[in-house]
Amino acid sequence: MEVPILKQGAFLIATFQAALSDADLNQLRMGLVQQVVKLRSRAVIVDVTAMDVMDSFASRTLREIAHMIRLRGAETVIVGIQPEVAFAMVQLGLTLEGVATALDLEEGLAYLNEKFKITN
Amino acid sequence: MAKRDSTTTDLELKRTEEPSELLRELVAHLRQNRTQLREEWVVRISETRLLTAMTKEEIFAEATSVYDSYVEALETEAFEALQAYARNLSERIIPRGVETHEVVGIVLLLRDVLARSLFAKYQNDFKKLNRILDAYEPAANRIANTVAVGFVQERERVIRQQQEAIRELSTPVLQVRERLLILPIIGVIDPQRARQLTEQLLRGIRTNRAKVVVIDITGVAAMDVTVANHLVQTVEASRLLGATVIVTGLSPEIAQTLVTIGVDLGKMNTVGDLQGGIEQAERLLGYKVASIAEPR
């Protein structure tokens, strides 16, 4: 299942679907970094609103995506983690440390706009 | 059939009087003498000082319906219906302050009153009395059991409901500014309450689109290691929803607990008191508080 990656100005938005296999996640990781390079994006927003479970592989993939994108000088924001998913994640010790998070797409865009306004 | 002291006659008697027939006979007797037996029962109830929380009229009304349900249960052996009736009865009388021992007490009194009337009726025929009692006793005991269990189940349900209500009352999530929530915690936190707190807070963050949460634990004297860990998890889960948490009002004991369990204080944003916490939250959100100069 392909995850759609949309361009929004200097940012990319990747929207996770509900059931992503490990293969899908791997494909997405490479795809996102390639797009950041090709389009010279400054940030990526990964929207996980549709995910109702987050296992350790998905969590680790998100951290790796953020690190790889940071190596390209770009920022990653994870948005839309559901309350139940957040609760389950911290109980398993999956805290997405070092990765920026926001409530939803709107907040994620607001955060990035604020951040890049200052450094501009 | 003539009464003879031979086993053949007993067997013949047994064959003609099946238990169900005996049951029908005693149920008919209990129905016929309904008014008198019910009166006797109500008198016994006040003699033993049960149901003191209820008025005479209330007792009479309930006694009538209990008596009829009792006799019907003897007749039909429909014990589920009786259990439902018992739960329903409990729902009505528990709020009036009736205790479990009173309910069990009055059912046993009714059983005794009815048994005595059976003794009186069949006193001249000891063998028949025995057979009647063989039919009556198991059914009567089952009724007492069913009513007691129904009553206790209803009380347990009410207790659970009240516990839930108390828990929800004691963890309000309050919005004091745009994007700023306050969660004042008072009293004892057990793991169950801690879990409920977290769930309510996370839901509140999403509903109110909060960016900062101040959790004030001034009113919490102590917490054990489990609950302290839970607090840390709450802070981390809130961050995943894009909200910053400021914890205020840590008592010396709790500060000690947190240090002992090795909480990474870099992860936890703490301020001395609630006032300081709100001030910092306002700074984070870009608010500035200025006083309006008084006109001369």
Image: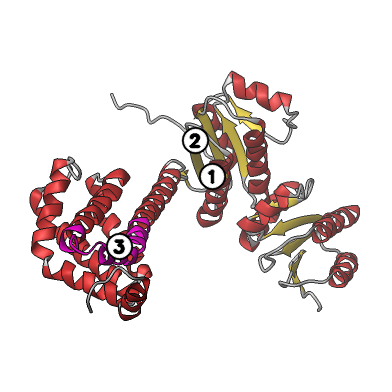
Within the image, what quadrant is residue B24 found in?
Answer: bottom left
Q: Amino acid at mark 1?
A: Leu
- Up-down: is B117 above or below A118? below
Q: Is residue B121 magenta?
A: yes
Is the Cβ of the residue at disc 3 closer than 8 Å to that at disc 1?
Answer: no
Of residues B252 and A105, which is closer to you in this image?
B252
- Up-down: is B174 above or below A104? above
| Mark 3 belongs to chain | B
| Mark 2 belongs to chain | B
In the picture of the structure, the residue carrying the numbered disc 3 is B130
**Which label was assigned to residue B185?**
2
* Residue drawn at (65%, 52%) of the image: A87
Is the Cβ of the residue at disc 1 closer than 8 Å to that at disc 2?
Answer: yes
- Up-down: is B51 above or below A69? above
Is A30 positioned to the left or the right of B95 in the image? right
Q: Gap in Å between the C-alphas at discs 3 and 1?
A: 62 Å
In the picture of the structure, the residue carrying the numbered disc 1 is B197
Q: Earlier in the sequence, mark 1 or mark 2?
A: 2
Within the image, what quadrant is residue A15 found in?
Answer: bottom right
Q: Quadrant of the C terminus of chain B?
A: top left
Callout 3: SS: helix
State the count of labels: 3
- Where in the figure is residue A109, as x and y percent of width and height? 67, 59
Disc 3 residue crowd, few under 14, some 14–19, many 20+, Cα 10 Å? few
- The magenta span reads B119-146
